[in-house]
Amino acid sequence: MQKIYYPDNFKIEVVKHYKMHRNIGATLEKYGIARSTLFKWKKKYEENHFFRVSKKPANNGHKAKAHLDKLNKIMEASKELRCGVTASITDKVAEIKRLEGKYSIHVLCEALQLPIGTYYNRKKNGDVPSRYELADNQLSVLIREIFYQSNERFGRNPIKYKLQERGYQVSKTRISRLMKEMGLQVKAAPYTLEHKKASSRTKFRNLLRGKFSPEAPNTVWASDITYVKVKDQYMFVCVVIDLFSRKVLSYGISNTIDTVLTMNTFDEAFEERGQPQNLIFHSDQGVQYTSYAFRSHLGDLGCRQSFSAPGYPYDNSVCESFFNTLKKEAIYYHIYESASELAAVLDEYIEYYNEVRMHRTLNMKTPSQVETEFFERVVL
């Protein structure tokens, strides 16, 4: 029998369908594949698109020292740089050349957030932008023009169609990245008292009401998503945090921001913590959290959802604070060529964050210390 070769995008679609609906029979019938094939593709998808917090024991003292040494080198180089991370590639390359003998290329590139491959390409070919850089520059002009012609109403979807009308085939991910780099944001309606009243009548209610300090672990979890540049695209990072201890319970990485990412991240934490009951799960009102599939899944597990009000990001301030700290202390000091490199940095930093880093909000204790002391009190 002749072997059938399926394209990767078809395999991903099948796995996403299964993860979304959690129905093996329906997935097999819809796509006409064998059960063993489905789980083989599922395993491959999870290896390539989803990374979990490392469970291996670590020498925390050694890792903490290495982490601080690395930051010190980058900070020392940053003091001598005459430009910052927002400078042009040309200016960044010139600064790296000027300090090349004093600091390593890797340290200088990390300090300026310049991919090391871009530096060597410019060094080899002179001050000539790559074709991809030139294409980005051209697209940025068009995107900005379309955005302002719409009176700041068009997001990535309508901009994509407008670009298609002009003969440009551009992915939504690339448009989102360029819009973020240019600081282009669609106008949001002001959040008035009328909005608040309408919101209170919906099912997307805020159960926390600003109370971010529950009395025990596994009472309230919070989740959010950020993005990190990996080579020539953006990867999305989702985290789940226990508000009692501020401990990061799990994280997920994906090249798409969808319900699969949030569901996998939640499931990892839920299994790791022994499937806690009467749990409140707090997030913003992104479609990744409000989708029928995600809400049904949490409902089946006996978990109640809580949502930040639109326009009030500080309702999820714990996750926002973690992402800010993560970027300042780890993300911005690395250049990522693959999702696995990003996962390695996250593994190291989250272990450091949970086990070594002291938190002012925890009276200068680590999240793990706080949980250990709580359970010791319960046992006693």
Image (tube, rainbow, N blue to C red):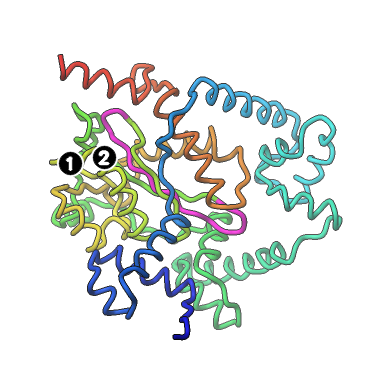
Disc number for residue 11:
none
For residue 53, above or below residue 236: above
Residue located 52% across and 41% down the image? 344
Residue located 46% across and 74% down the image? 158
Q: Nearer the viewer, residue 379 or 235?
A: 379
Q: Main secondary structure of the magenta part?
A: strand
User: In the structure shown, which secondary structural element does the residue marked by tag 2 occupy?
Assistant: strand
User: CA separation, marks 2 and 1?
Assistant: 8 Å
Q: Which residue is mark 2?
A: 221
Q: Which residues are magenta?
A: 229-245
Q: Are marks 2 and 1 in contact (CB under 8 Å)?
A: yes
Q: Amino acid at mark 1?
A: Leu
How far from the left and from the top, in percent, is residue 221?
26, 39
For residue 75, above or below residue 281: above
Quarter location, residue 331: top right
How far from the left and from the top, in percent, is residue 285?
29, 54
